[in-house]
Amino acid sequence: MTRYSLCPGVCLLVLFLLFQSCGHKTNTLKKGKYTPDSLTMVVDESLQPIVDQELYVFKALETKARPKVIYAPENEAVNLLLADSVRMVLIPRELSAQEKQVLKSRNLVTIVNRFAVDAIAIIVNKSSNDTLITVSEVKKMLNGQAKQDKNIIFDNPNSGLVRYLKEFSGNKELKQKNIFSLKSNKDVIKYVSQHPNSIGIVGFPWLNDPDKDYADAVDNIKIVGVRNDTAKNASPDYFTPSQTTLALKQYPLTRNLYIVNCTGNMSLGMKFEVFMRGERGQLIVLKSGILPDNIPDRQINIVK
């Protein structure tokens, strides 16, 4: 486990090793190398459970397609898009005005669409007595004013999740002595499952239908209920993340997930976006446990 800090040089090294481990050499990300059946996209690594399932079904339908995915922290995903190394990213935020201007200056038509609403889950060890928390307490915890006797655990310090938590807490840096970062959401879940004196913050899809390599860890944690005490006419109830609490806007720790597409109308990237935002793709989002942007219709036939 490492403290929440990572120098720029280490960031570049981690990204290079990530490309290598995914079977992509950095020199394969060349500008202008696009064909109707090929696609290289970069996805925020916290979205991997959803995108893996989307790609599995998409490739079964588009047998000639050759989509490739690089999972990387949000910062690196956006930087590769701005450098024109890739033309498509999936990230948990919209582009800033400055980032849009960079793409516009290259005469790139950029389409940004939401495909899901995600939940940020707070988890504790199964033996912990911490089962409820308010939004005010979460902000105090992230600013070192509460839960100082607990280790607060995040994923990669360059991830979209950490950016979200900085904005949520109003804290530019999360450098308190009890705040640590690991490599991934999966590592956070494993750590919390083994350490009763810890609190983890992860993307909710990582807790729904986990892979075998960390399913036992998920069984040894529990999700903390959150009450939004800062809202006008605040409800006295505590909520855990679910499609119901997301749809009714009861669970307060949420974020929108976006497809940023600069690949053009006739590209494989556009086909994949249409698939993800269509009925089949949105059903996969529904199965992941979070809220689809377009909830698929359910037809019921009643036979007498």
Image: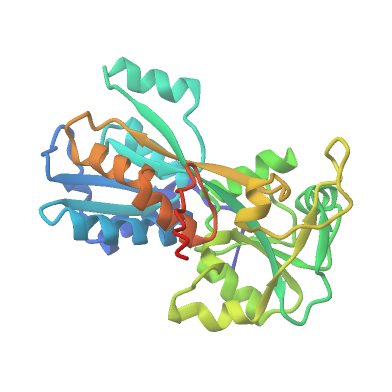
- Place of residue 265 in the rendered image (x, y in percent of width and height, measured from the top left): 21, 29
Up-down relation of residue 22 to residue 172 (above or below): below
Q: How many marks?
A: 0
Write the residue at 68% across / 46% down.
248
What is the x, y in percent for residue 217? 57, 80
| Residue extending farthest front | 304
**Residue placed most toward the observer, 131 or 247:** 247
Q: Nearer the viewer, residue 298 or 65?
A: 298
In terms of image quadrants, where is residue 221?
A: bottom right
| Position of residue 48 measured from the top left corner of the image (x, y, whole percent) | 41, 58
Q: Quadrant of residue 153?
A: bottom right
Q: Position of residue 257 (x, y in %)?
A: 49, 43
* 145 sits left or right of 5 in the view: right
**Residue 4 in view here:** no
State the colouring used for the structure image.
Answer: rainbow
From the viewer's perspective, tell me whether residue 36 is left or right of residue 140.
Answer: left
- Left or right: residue 254 compared with residue 76: right
Q: Quadrant of residue 146 in the image?
A: bottom right
- Image position of 52 (left or right of 226): left
Q: Is residue 20 above or below residue 293?
A: below
Q: Is residue 46 visible?
A: yes
Q: Is residue 195 above or below residue 176?
A: below
Task: Tell which of 270 and 26 is nearer to you.
Answer: 270
Residue, x 16% and y 47% (percent of image)?
28
Pick the quarter of the image with the N terminus: bottom right
- Could you tell me which residue is drawn at 45 percent across and 80 percent down? 213
Question: For the point 72% across and 40% down, which residue is it?
Answer: 171
